[in-house]
Each structure stands twice: as C-alpha cells, then as structure tokens.
Image (cartoon, grey):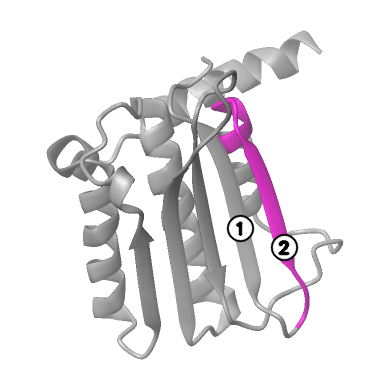
Amino acid sequence: NQTVKKMQMVVHGILKELRPETLDKLGLADSLRELRSEWLGHHPGTRFELIIANDMNGVDVIDKTISIAVYRLVQESLNNICKYSRAGRVVVHLMREKSSPVLADTLLLSVEDDGVGFDTDQKSVGFGLLGMRERVISAGGEFLLQSSPGMGTRITARLPFESKV
C-alpha cells in the first residue's frame, strides 16, 4: 500500500510538470483554439465545434494544474477519437458551472463525438481513459465516461478552478 501511494505521488508529480508551452503563452481558451486548428489541419473531414462560454474567455483564475488537466483531457480525447471512433463530428464544450453561495464555481468540460462508441464495461487495452480519469481525480474533480456501441462517446469532467493539491 505504501508503494502504491509513493507511485501515485511520483506520477502526480510528473503529470504536474508536463505543461504545454501554449498554455503559458496563450492561456487555456486560446490554447484549445490552437489545438482545434492543428487537429482540423490533420482531420479536415471532421466537423469540430469548440464552444467556450463567454465567461471562460480570458479567465486567469484557473490554476496551472487544472489548465493542464483540461488541455490534456481534450488532447487525449482527440487522440482517441482519431484512433478509434471514426467520428464525423466532435464537440468540445468548456464552461463555468455556477454553484450556490456556499459552494465554489466549477469548470465543466465535455468532449463528445458521434463515432462508433464502445462498451464501457469492456476492459480497456490502453492507458488513455485511465490516465484521463486519474488526472481529473488527482486535481480534485469528477470524471464521467458515457458510451455504447453505435452511439458515440461523451467524456465529462467537473473540476475546481483551483487544484486541491
């Protein structure tokens, strides 16, 4: 058990350091726009909607760990869509979820495709989905995967604006 905890700490440290340069230069919203442009250059036949709520543009209260998590989630989702889904349409939606006066606002990210989908009960062969889930949980968030054969896939992450770590 001690070994597992130590490994989790090491992995968390590595994930924290893997920060895309564009996040520092452009911020989260513009980095996602750049990622979309690059992806469309390689996949021109796919419709890609990037919806960033107005209250997310120019937001600088998102800490680095959360920005990295969001960026990497989108990046890994696009990688999976490219490899497996055969999607014709991808929608990435980033918004601020307003909470009550007692609870802090959260950041809500969803990545959805209209591809072939898969059985979520089937054992995954790669580390992509597991890594995405671990990244969100380690940042103090919640991760939800929805998919079924023939129905596409939707990944939803609810994250705090400030990491709990």
Residue 7's x, y, as percent? Answer: 64, 20
The secondary element bearing badge 1 is classed as strand
Q: Which residues are magenta?
A: 136-149
Work out whether residue 128 can be spotted: no
Residue 9's x, y, as percent? Answer: 58, 16
Against 92, is 106 above or below? above
Q: Using residue 152 as the reference point, say whether residue 135 is left or right of it.
A: left
| 161 in magenta | no
The secondary element bearing badge 2 is classed as strand
Near mark 2 (Cα within 10 A), the count class, few <14, some 14-19 or many ≥20, is some
Against 52, is 8 above or below? above
Q: Residue at x 62, y 64 (%)?
A: 154
Q: Which mark is residue 155?
A: 1
Q: Are marks 2 and 1 in contact (CB under 8 Å)?
A: yes
Of the pair 140 and 35, the residue shown nearer to us:
140
Q: Which mark is residue 146?
A: 2
Against 43, is 92 above or below? above
